[in-house]
Image: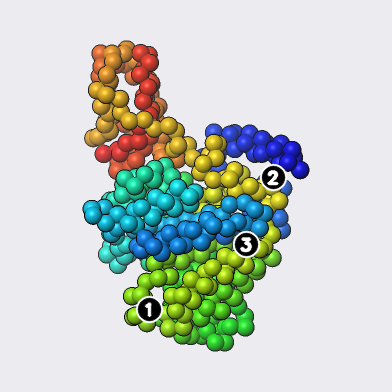
Amino acid sequence: MIRRNRIFAKSILATLFLFTITSFAQTITRSTNPPARNGVTRANAPQFIVIGADDNTNAHAFTWMDTTIANGRNRDGSRRYMSFYVNTRSGWSGSNVTVRNAARAAYDRGHEVSNHTHDHPNIRDRNMTELQIFDNIMQAQNAMVAAGIPAAHQFGFRTPFLAHTPETFTAMRRAGILYDCSITSTALAGNHNYPYNSGQSHNVQGLWIVPATNVTVHPNDRAALGNRSTVAGLDWNLWSPTSGGGIGNGMDSAQTVRALMFSLTESLAGNRAPFTFGPHSQYYFDSTAAATGWFPNITAAQRRGAFREFVRQASLLEDVFFVSGDMVVRWMLNPVPAAQFRPDDYHRSSPTSIMPREIHSSKTPNNASVSIANGNINLHLPTAASNANIALYDVRGRLLFERNVAVNGNIANVALPQSIVRNQAVILQVKTNSDFNLTKRILVK
Ligand SMILES: [Zn+2]
């Protein structure tokens, strides 16, 4: 048994290695079926649960949710992971870095910690420009980098209030986001869309859409809950009476667990599309929410109880795995049946990660300066050379531009094609005939 697993692991590694080179052209269109490769079918796909917590503005609550997932195992004994989409407005700098520390601890435990903008603006209501959105995303990205969470590991993004605009998606793309999870899949459980990177209404090349799946209300509870059969897959929407035109007085604890488990088991018996659910970790402790009567039928203690109970029950089910959003994207690129799925082969720490932006990035060596501004790449090298190879990749590793240029002593300049958009983070690689070697993440200005 052990030996078989080992052989299997080797073949996985070999496959993953190959697709680090080839996957970026891989187009996966929106579908309710899993990718039909490697023997994967609707009946044998892993049933992923992506808990993607939004805001996370309370350090204690952040750590509570992180450890609730981390301190337990999937049915097969493998580690459980989740995603956090954070705002970085408070608790991240100055004299109060409690939230920042909680975020770093969650990252260190293996969870994904990603972007929900710096200060949670309503992008649609404010008519924000692409540059304003980009700046807001980058503020959060930089705060996380300062916390020790590499930009290359900040894979996902959820739009505040799900109020996305076309500019939101192009801004995400420029900030190097791998996947969005702001677009709802409104089907009944069992028939949700799988993630896709092509054919979306907001067609942004290379960006993955991991659908935010609606929760399906348990049939026995529908009469008591405004005759709703589905509700947006965020905890606020389950519990608030004002949610999207009324869900009765909001769910109580038992209705919450029944809805989540019903959604999961229907999906498991259906097409097994990833079940994504968006809690807000601060709601599980925030006395403000209770004080203002947001959730009349469920106390903070009951919210924690319902969350724990769902995680407990789900973890008893065969073929069910708690994973982060980026792990689902890796699986989409290299799908295997549940019986062969090993979460850690798809984790960011896997030595053969799909993320080409994990090209080892170095600090600019002493006395070298590089910039990309006004349509030019400008290099000032620490050692003289006669020629240099300059390559530019987008943050997902797609080659944008490559050129061999003459170096005049220590200086080289080359014009950038106009097709390369500005205000985009890119990876610059420079190699000279004098053995100068540089890989650097840099902003195209
Ligand atoms: Zn939010």
Q: Residue at x 73, y 41 (%)?
A: 2
Task: Kindly state the secondary structure of the residue where label 2 is placed.
Answer: loop
Asked if residue 244 can be seen in this view, the reply is: no
Q: In the image, 68: left or right of 369?
A: right
Residue 115: x percent and y percent? Answer: 38, 54
Q: Amino acid at mark 1?
A: Ala
Q: Earlier in the sequence, mark 2 or mark 1?
A: 2
Residue 180: x percent and y percent? Answer: 45, 55
Mark pair 2, 1: CA separation? 48 Å
Q: Residue at x 30, y 54 (%)?
A: 97
Residue 182: x percent and y percent? Answer: 44, 61
Q: Earlier in the sequence, mark 3 or mark 1?
A: 1
Residue 20 vs 253, above or below: the answer is above
Q: Residue at x 44, y 53 (%)?
A: 106
Q: How many other residues sit within 10 Å of disc 2, few (<14), some (14-19) or many (≥20)?
A: few
Task: Kindly state the secondary structure of the residue where label 1 is placed.
Answer: helix
Q: Which residue is mark 3?
A: 315
Q: In the image, 103: left or right of 412?
A: right
Task: Compare residues 166 and 225 and report the one nearer the observer.
Answer: 225
Task: Nearest to the eye among marks 2 and 1: give it.
Answer: 1
Residue 204 vs 361, above or below: the answer is below
Q: Amino acid at mark 3?
A: Ser
Task: Kindly state the secondary structure of the residue where label 3 is placed.
Answer: loop
Residue 290, which numbered label? 1
Mark pair 3, 1: CA separation? 29 Å
Task: Compare residues 145 and 91 and report the one nearer the observer.
Answer: 91
Q: Residue at x 44, y 79 (%)?
A: 299
Mark pair 2, 3: CA separation? 25 Å
Q: Amino acid at mark 2?
A: Asn
Task: Compare residues 146 and 188 and report the one nearer the observer.
Answer: 146
